Image (spheres, rainbow, N blue to C red):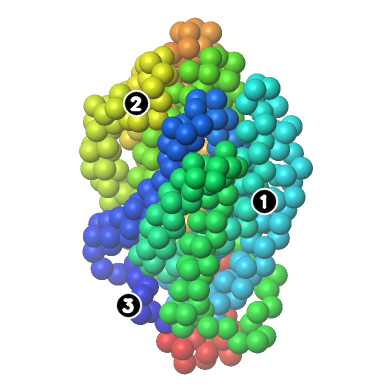
Amino acid sequence: MRGNRTTDMTRGPVFGQMAAFALPVLLGMVCQRIYNFADAYIVGRYLGDQALAAVSIAGTAMYIMTSVMMGVTTGVSVVISQFYGAGQSRKIRKTFVSGIHVCIWIAALITALGMATTEPLLCALQTSRGLMPDASRYLMIIYAGCGTTMLYNFASSVLRAMGNSIAPLIFLVISSALNVVLDVAFVSWIPMGVAGAALATVLSQLISGVLCIGYALKILPVLCLRGKEWKADRYLIRQILRYGLPTGLQMSIISISDMTLQAVINTYSTAMIVAYGVALKVEGLGFQIADAIGSAMGTFAGQNAGAGNLDRVRKGVRSAYLLNIVSYGIFCPAVFLLAEPVMGAFTDTPESIYYGVEYMRIFTVFFLAGGILVVYHNILRATGDVAVTVLMGVSEVATRIGCAFLFPALFGYRGLWFVSPATWICAAVVGAVRYYGGGWEKRAALLTGNGENGTIRQVSDNEQKEEKTEN
């Protein structure tokens, strides 16, 4: 089952494997982030600050959609990585098919609900009348094309679960380059306004998704399906949802808390909205480092939990700490020093530049806490301790919403810049207590047991024979 297009992370040097896996994931996430940067830069330069503010608000509203989709595909990735570590290729194929069914239904649901609730959602964000038309137009197109986002996330999650982080990177690089070209074409040459920027993003994601799923089906023998194997497995659907829904819920409630902060900021000037929107993109870029390391941690922990190697999981966590320290030791000083020219690339308004520089120089001091938080999310989720990740999400929501109203009352607008750092620290403490308390180990031990309590169940005699034949 294993080959040179996948990576068995249950053996070999821990730090080297995780670093080698995380780097392509990071580069891929940076390319994905370029979608948003390209939208913001081109919209700001060709359409002005009003349009840029509208796109920034719409971007915040999009987080719920992307959170649910990422949660579901994370569920697919966790289950596949556990079966991969256990060497059960039939279960991998069944999970792959079941994941397709789940993703189709979730994408259809998100599209319908998203398009039906676009304006109420923007109203809840206290979007002004002047910004509402552009924000609504942008968001409607993104919701209509959310199936393209789901397609890529699903395909990449399958490949990464089996240790392949290179292929998703390649397809995202191609898609990112295309996105920049289409942005310029649809916003400047045609011109279509903010709708053009949204359409460019959807088309680019469609291409990367089709290429990624086509590659996975062509080069991974373990995914070669026979006629009857296209039928979904109800048990595996439940397992995917068991991991995916809590993850999506955790991400969604965090998105809701983010929108609360956005709503508070929207009560300030357009200059403040623009500054926060640009700085948020830089913050998001920084979190790509944490997410890449977290993705490596999740795959590593999932495979080793499936194989019963809990000592190796602990070594992986220590390696993830070190990767965060090294990465943010470079990123944070760079952002601190380059904050002003970064803001100047997106807007010429002095007030916006001032606010944005101020926020960026504050959050860089606390970024390591955010990176460690993501490590805990992934180790706990991959070993079956998903309930605690939801609790961590709830703590983030409570902290962010409470601080979003408390800090400005105590410290003025500058208090808003400390809301996210306080949130990261509080949630990381919850994760640390659970990890060092050892509760996750009991959950992980269930994975290799029998019955419905764990994902890795004992297969039938016939399935065991087929596993031996395929391996």
**Measured along the vertical axis of the image, is residue 226 above or below residue 150?**
below
Element marked by disc 2? helix
Amino acid type, mark 2: Gly
User: Where is mark 3, residue-wise?
Assistant: 4
Quarter in which the C terminus is drawn: bottom left
Which circle, 2 or 3, is nearer the viewer? Answer: 2
User: Where is mark 1, residue-wise?
Assistant: 144
Quarter in which the N terminus is drawn: bottom left
Question: How many numbered circles does the render carry?
Answer: 3
Picture quadrant of residue 123? top right
The percent coordinates of residue 232 (x first, y second) are: 68, 74
Q: Nearer the viewer, residue 404 or 44?
A: 44
The percent coordinates of residue 242 (x first, y second) are: 62, 57
Residue at screen point 65% across, 22% down: 130
Which circle, 1 or 3, is nearer the viewer? Answer: 1
Q: Earlier in the sequence, mark 2 or mark 1?
A: 1
User: Where is mark 2, residue-wise?
Assistant: 344
Residue at screen point 53% across, 18% down: 270
**Measured along the vertical axis of the image, is residue 289 above or below residue 102?**
above
Amino acid type, mark 1: Ala
Distance in Å between CA atoms under marks 1 and 3? 37 Å
**In this rendering, does residue 166 appear at all?**
yes
